Amino acid sequence: MMQSDSREPLLGTNLKAIVFFIITIVIVSLILFKNLFFQSTYLLKSFGELSVDPEIAFKNNKPTFLEFYAEWCEVCKEMAPKISALKDEYEKDINFVFLNVDNPKWGNYIRKFDVNGIPQVNLFDKTGNLKSTFIGKQEESIMRESIFNLEREEVSQEEIFNTEFSEIKGKKNSEVYPRSHG
């Protein structure tokens, strides 16, 4: 009887130590890898702050990259690092405008460009003519090529549609049945 009594506290102490060790590893991992875990969400939140005002963008004689997005959109989060890389590379020569579809302030642009699914990227030449529309998840290489052609003024109007996008909440479109990510 004495032996079993002495083992129970020892077992309880070891279990507590193991649980403490696992919790410590999880906390340290979250701290060390927080950028990896939260980078996309952070990038989306920063897009609005880094955006060129659309009124200025369409009047300053530079091509414009206009993205409609939402912070809840999983496809937008997935594409955020690619879009951020494009912005870093081309922002000297191209306006980058990011409009959050949840902000009522941008309703006129959402209607004007018939935004039903996000992310939606519209590329405009330096005189404000729409040249390309990308709806849904896109390969970075395709967007990069369109931007390159836009700078060289070689783009004819194109629309590239991918069924992997998020439907804007509250909007109904009878012709499109997207997979929901929101």
Image (cartoon, grey):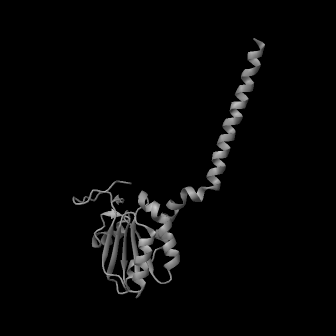
Residue that appears at 64% across and 48% down: 27
Rendered view: 141 above or below 16: below
x, y (%) of residue 84?
50, 70
Rendered view: 149 above or below 99: below
Q: Residue furthest left?
A: 174
Between 80 and 31, the one lying in front of the other is: 80
Q: Is residue 53 visible?
A: no
User: Residue 20 falls in which quadrant of the image?
Assistant: top right
Residue that appears at 28% across and 69% down: 114
Quadrant occupied by the N terminus: top right
Residue that appears at 71% across and 26% down: 11
Left or right, 7 with reference to 91: right
Residue that appears at 77% across and 15% down: 3
x, y (%) of residue 144?
44, 75
Left or right, 64 with reference to 8: left
Quadrant occupied by the C terminus: bottom left
Q: Is residue 132 visible?
A: yes
Left or right, 45 with reference to 18: left
x, y (%) of residue 57?
41, 81
User: Residue 113 falls in which quadrant of the image?
Assistant: bottom left
x, y (%) of residue 70?
41, 62
User: Residue 6 falls in which quadrant of the image?
Assistant: top right
